[in-house]
Every structure is written in C-alpha cells, then in structure tokens.
Image: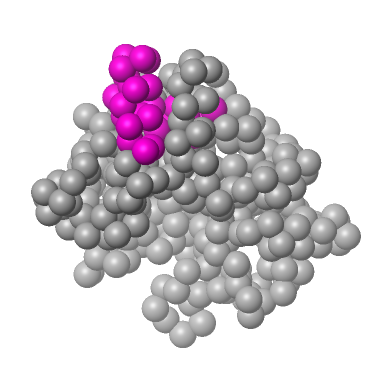
Amino acid sequence: MKRRLGQTDIQIAPWVLGTNTAGWTADEKTSFATFDAFVDAGFSALDTADVYSRWVPGNDSESERIIGRWMKARGNRDKVHVFTKVGMDLGGEGQKGLSARWIEKAVEDSLTRLQTDYIDLYQPHEPDPETSPAETLEAFDRLVKAGKVRWIGCSNYNTAQLDRAIRTSKEKNLAQFQSVQNEFNLYTREKYDADLAELMQGNGVSLLPYFSLAAGFLTGKYRGEADLKKSSRGESIGRRYMNNKGHAILHAMDRAAEREGASLTEIALAWVVAQPGVVGALASASSPDQVEELANGVQLELSDTSLRELNAAGG
C-alpha cells in the first residue's frame, strides 16, 4: 500500500532506495540492474545526494550521474521519484552549506547530472549554522515556484531546528519541509524522539528514516568478535552496537523472526515502517539479489506480540 509523503501529492510504496552505493560498491551496470529490480517490484522513490559517492577517488557525484543515465536509458522519468540533497562539503570554495547562492548553483548541477528538469524532493543534507533558516527557505521557495523542485524536505534536523524552519515557512508564506530524513532504527531511536514525532505529526511532516538496518548490525550477521573481523566496518559496528542493548535487540529479533517466518533484515524493516509517521524505510541495495528481501521486509506486517517485544528490547 502506498503512503503519502507529508502533505504532498507524492505517493510511494514504503521503501525508498538509498543510492549511495551507486558508483561505490555497485558499478553502473549493477546499479542499473538494481534500479530495474526495485521498480519492477512496485517501488518508485530513489534517494541520492550531490555528495554521493565523492569519497571514492575519481568519483564526481557519481550517484546522481548514474541515476540520470539510467532514467534516460529507460525513458522512465515520469514513473520514478527522485530525492536528492544539498549542503555537504563538495570540496571547492563555497561549495557547501545552505546559502541562497550555493543552493541556486547546486540545484542546477544536480539537475544536469540527473538529466531532468525537476527534482521531486530537495533536501538540505544537514542544518547550516552559518545561514539563517529564512535565507535557505526563501531559496528553496524560489526553486519550487520555478518548477525546478516539487517539494522540500530536510535531513538530520532536531526538534528545535525543525520547529524554527516550520515557523519561518508559515510566517513568511514559504514552501515548508514535508519530510525529515533522520537516523532511526531498532537500536537508534533518540533522533526521532517523542517531541520530534509530535512536532512532525502535528504539522503533517513524514519521517524518511535512514540506517534502517543499523549499518548491517540488525541483519544478524554480527554476533561476536569473529563476525566483526569479516567486515571493514566491523570495528565501528562493534564499538557502537555490541553491548547489552544490542544483544537484547538481536534476541528479540530472533524470536520475532521465528514467529513471523522472516529474516532479521525483514523484521528490522517491518518494525521501522510500522512506526507512526514513517512514510517509508530508506535502505540501500548493492545488487538486484538484495531487492526481494528488502521488499519483503517493508511489506511485512508484524504481530502485536512481535511489536511489543521489539519495542521493549530497544527502549
């Protein structure tokens, strides 16, 4: 079943494909095949950013470029929703933040890379303490009125930052954020706490949670020191999640997986999309083979018993 993004006319199935892997852990051919499988499974929203994946030597905003070439090759721009972001440091003089001048330049660059004349959802990647919310929102509003951006959302905003942005939009009659993209999963819940959830739901703002699988910890493949050594991310995962809370969550997930006849990945995603205000879980796939399991997860309805036990384990 599709869900509406905030107060927009965008209706999406409850999985937003993270594309930070495009041009990084997935080459262009694999990315094309993954995008095809994602759309064939009934989903439509792809999330990217101008900074993906510039951390790879030689890459220049490769994720947006690959998406653009894929949409052109498939002729399917009207069948997909493109979400992208602005604000992270791209490495050049003045190429970061949320000033009006940079937003106006960055959006044109993203449109060129994406080979499209509009972006469905444009989002500041993180707040910019050096630029007033009014300047940022006025710039976004001009883009909306020009038809270059349909709707705006934000990422990594806390309650106070979102409240100030909403108030500014209302006071100045500007385009308003329709979504918040924050880290949120069975382990990490404080970035979508009760105050933020109340503010968002009271203003018709949806949550697009990222790190739905907690960097892979919630897939269940990291159970001990030996597992951590199998991955380049093992050390950081161990420091963050290998503790009493993490083990309690995995045990609760094991019970839920047996009860529901599902994998731990599916349980983790099903829990996220069951939370109030969530429009869809944001999860990346590096290959077409991963699409089926992720699709199953966001469409799984957990029993009351499973939800209750999972809530208690990570609370």
Q: Relative to 22, does residue 302 appear above or below in the rendering? A: above
> Magenta segment range?
248-274
Say how the picture is coloured. Answer: one colour
x and y, in percent, of residue 231 in the image: 16, 52
Q: Which residue is located at x 64 percent, y 51 percent?
A: 152
The residue furthest right is 171
x and y, in percent, of residue 129 in the image: 63, 76
The residue furthest bottom is 93
Pick the quarter of the image with the N terminus. Answer: top right
Q: Which residue is located at x 33 percent, y 32 percent?
A: 251
Q: Relative to 21, does residue 167 appear above or below in the rendering? A: below
Left or right of 172, for residue 55: left
Q: Nearer the viewer, residue 208 or 302?
A: 302
Residue 61 visible, this orientation: yes
Q: Tell me which corner region of the image, top left, top right, bottom left or bottom right, holds residue 283.
A: top left
Q: Which residue is located at x 60 percent, y 67 percent?
A: 127
x and y, in percent, of residue 211 in the image: 41, 47
x and y, in percent, of residue 190 in the image: 55, 51
Q: Tell me which corner region of the image, top left, top right, bottom left or bottom right, holds residue 165.
A: bottom right
